[in-house]
Image (cartoon, helix red, strand yellow):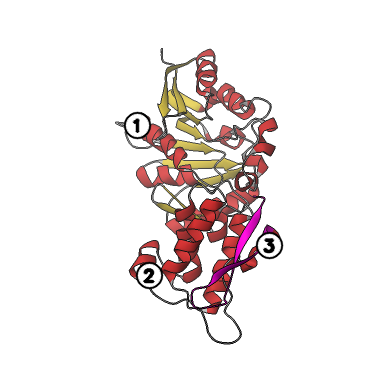
Amino acid sequence: MVGQSAILRNSNSLGILAKRRSLRHNRDVLPTPAASPPKTVWAVLDVLRWTTAHFEKHGLASARLDAELLAAHAFGMSRIELYAHFDRPLSAAELASYRDLVSRRLAGEPVAYLVGHKEFWSLDLLVDLRVLIPRPDSETLVEEALDRLAGSGASLRIADVGTGSGALALALSKERPDAQVFATDISPDALAVARTNAERLGLAANFLQGDLDQPLVPLGRFDLIVANLPYIPSADIDGLAADVRSEPRLALDGGADGLALVRRLVAEAPELLHPGGCLALEVGAGQADAVEKLLGATGFGGIRCRRDLAGIERVVSGLKGTSS
């Protein structure tokens, strides 16, 4: 973000708004205790209220949530504990740690990267600059996949193409422990994160490095393939919010129309699916109709679209070898 940041200076028992600096000097975004008395004592709730207001002033959409997540990380507490111990005074070291996180958030770093993890499908996933941050919207893809698998017998084979942090593969492994789950990614760095998440969570998945579905070709056919592939048009990426632009471009860039990788996977998926097997794809806003047509032209039937919680057509799926 661009703009000036209000700086608090410890000049009396309450603290006052003192001066303004550019964002590159935002390490003083919270008061630093004075070298001599009187000292201002900042408690947990004081910091949360001030930071929430400051984030709102700078246009952060989830100002309170961001403030809470950063505080919980800096102070070694859960979000519930922040309010259970709202009057606990904070040490100079805690304030310094929190000040740094607030400064970096205002400079555009995503909260998930700052705290090092993100919840997805009730799984606590480690995330960093090597992987796309899992979004709640992608849980719509898990829901669609589970619906498509409902009533299926044992010995299911599931593939997640472009797994990133492993979010989809691990969510499906959690819900269908009877299934064999495979996950691919072109990035060895992303796969390292995904493997770490699988080990931490005690969930079974087989991770394979390679371009799209190519690592799956020697493995035979699957009952379900899911994919949250890059779907942002190349020309739109530079106009995204700073926190989104900080994520791997490889995980964002979907080519000229956003569907370059989706188009490839749709064309190749029939060779990898059992008859009646499902391909389920996450898509961007306004892309569902085009993807439905791609599936239909490739011989998929039973095509349907699923909306996310915001009402956006987020997931398109179809079945191999069935009529629509």
From the viewer's perspective, is the residue at label 3 or at label 2 nearer?
3
How many C-alpha atoms fall within 10 Å of the one at disc 2: few (<14), some, or many (≥20)?
some
Tell me what residue is drawn at x 52 percent, y 22 percent.
Answer: 270
From the viewer's perspective, is the residue at label 3 or at label 1 nearer?
3
Q: Earlier in the sequence, mark 2 or mark 1?
A: 2
Residue identified by numbered label 2: 86
**Residue type highlighted by circle 2:** Phe
Marks 3/2: CA–CA distance: 29 Å
Q: Dots 3 and 2: beta carbons under 8 Å?
A: no
Tell me what residue is drawn at x 68 percent, y 26 percent.
Answer: 256
**Residue type highlighted by circle 1:** Asp
Q: Is residue 251 above or below residue 267?
A: below
Question: Picture quarter containing residue 179?
Answer: top left
- Residue 21: assigned label: 3
Magenta segment: does it hold 16?
A: yes
Q: What segment carries the magenta color?
A: 1-23
Between 103 and 258, the one lying in front of the other is 103
Marks 2/1: CA–CA distance: 43 Å
Q: Please state the total of marks drawn on the protein image.
A: 3
Among all residues in the image, which is located at the extreme left?
151
